[in-house]
Image: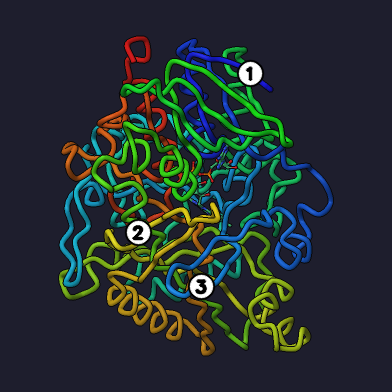
Amino acid sequence: MITDSATVVIIGSGMGGGTLAWGLAHRGIDVLVIERGDFLPREPENWSPQAVFVEKRYKPTETWVNDADDSEFGPGVHYVVGGNTKVYGSSLPRFRERDFEETIYPNGISPAWPFRYADIEPYYSQVEALFKVHGTTGEDPTEPWRSQPYPYPALAQEAYIEETMMRLQAQGLHPSPTAIGVDLQPGGSCIRCSTCDGFPCRLGAKSDAETCALGPALMTGHVRLLTGVRVTELETDGTDRVVRAVGEKDGERVEITGNAFVVSAGAANSAALLLRSRSERFPDGLANGTGLVGRNFMMHNNTHIAAIDPRRKNDVVFQKTFAMNDFYDDLGDGFPGGTIQMIGKVQASMMKTHATHAPLIMLKRMAERSLEFLVMTEDTPAPHNRITVGSDGRIRVAWNRTNYDRHELLLDKATKAFRKAGYVGLFQQRFTIDMNSHMCGTVVAGTDSATSVLDPWCRAHDVRNLLVVDSAFFPSSAAQNPALTIGAQALRVAAETDWASI
Ligand SMILES: Cc1cc2nc3c(=O)[nH]c(=O)nc-3n(C[C@H](O)[C@H](O)[C@H](O)COP(=O)(O)OP(=O)(O)OC[C@H]3O[C@@H](n4cnc5c(N)ncnc54)[C@H](O)[C@@H]3O)c2cc1C
């Protein structure tokens, strides 16, 4: 049996867990991070579309179950040191001030967060510095106020993209530079390649949680990392205290004791771990007295669009350089819409994973003239959208789209704008249950212990030394990429929690 102990035990080394470890390390706190995966190797396959997208080299073989019809699917998760950030697009925008307030939609409510933008703003600045965020102010009409400038200037636009931006600006729209985390500045290691969004970085130049947070935390000597250990249960001493994380490594039992336990396993796995941790005192799972653990699963309403302008060859290398938030607060009917943002340049072999019947040569011609972007709107929390654990131990996801009329309206606005900008062919790929890269909710934070699982600092209302610090705490999904907000809250929790008295 493997045993170990630490003052704070963190389960999961992704955006939440890795960043929290950094925050705790800088307070001199003794931390052990437990990660089920291993280090993602730096190897030629990192940049191979065939290896990454077709052979799914860095995805687990694990399947989850769609509760609607019992079908299996391969989830959008990566069990490696750094979690999903090892492959993410590192688009790191702040949520807007309104995202922390209640928003009423025609068909749903996005609830208020238990803290305001002003409470998390200093930590947005800190996490932007940690993750080397590049950006600019004054061009996006919805940008929130900031106490510090961006640490680095926005990435330069390539000529093809600049031309597209001008065509959108001519319609009165405001395309503005993407806030993005890459090591691209004098002396930096980023070479501005075409294999960033969706790929691991072979150079360590992407601002992922291993590179920017966990790695530096380990260097302080206050943090240790245990890889290849899947935590299966948290055990209490019969009271409201967790005393042990139990797991397994290569078939061997692992027991880790500690003073405080932080679950940062990602929204689905964090909920599943709590649900699996049953005891006499917590018969329905740890911290689940209200039955809320696993509920209110969200993952954004997202659609990828490949827009084709047959008259222009797209020779861009790094495409994810602008976003458009003109319809974020108002779609023209007084209700919010969402964001439209560039994604990494899609290559023909990547298209083939979805357009399986299309000949590769045709996809190649398309890819030469296409520009790809993402239309993202908020899905509102609903208790019936939930994570449960099946009798076979597998994660089950019950998911029905919510607030989708807003998505349809923004898609309509986006396609009209790009058509007007010369893109006559617009191909849509709507996200399905397996495209859960932005998942959140499931262990929500709030001020009322009857309607939330965690307090505003992510500490369980009814388990004294348990925290959940990852996207699971989100009371709403907003309509911006989640990672920066997960990181900012992790730094806030690290700084504002009295760890000695837990
Ligand atoms: C292809 C892709 C592109 C993306 N692009 C962006 C983007 O541009 N911008 C953005 O903001 N977000 C993006 N995201 C989403 C972003 O990566 C996630 O929101 C973020 O990583 C979630 O952080 P987390 O801490 O909740 O979970 P994760 O970062 O996934 O970390 C969870 C960790 O817990 C570990 N773990 C799970 N279960 C256990 C267990 N039982 N025991 C021990 N360890 C466990 C996992 O292995 C993992 O390391 C993208 C995601 C993907 C997949």
Front in this rendered view, residue 359 or 205: 359
The residue shown at (54%, 72%) is 71
The picture places residue 501, in percent across and down from the top left corner, at 32, 11
Label 3 beta carbon less than 8 Å to ligand 1 = no
User: Residue under circle 2?
Assistant: 479
Q: Is residue 211 visible?
A: no
Amino acid type of the residue that numbered disc 1 sits on in the rendered structure:
Thr
Amino acid carrying mark 2 in the image: Ala
Q: CA distance from mark 3 to mark 2?
A: 15 Å
The percent position of residue 63, horizontal first and vertical second, equals 60, 60
Residue 411: % across, % down = 38, 78
* Residue at the image point whose x is 18% and y is 67% from the top: 105
The residue at which mark 1 appears reads as: 3
Out of 260 and 83, give the one closest to the viewer: 260
User: Pointer 1: residues within 10 angstroms few (<14), some, or many (20+)?
Assistant: few
* Residue identified by numbered label 3: 304
Residue 216 quadrant: top right
Label 2: few (<14), some (14–19) or many (≥20) C-alpha neighbours in 10 Å: many
Assign a secondary structure to mark 2. Answer: loop
Q: CA distance from mark 1 to mark 2?
A: 42 Å
* Residue 470 horizontal/vertical position (percent): 43, 40
Which quadrant: the C terminus? top left
110 left or right of 79 in image: left
Image quarter of the N terminus: top right
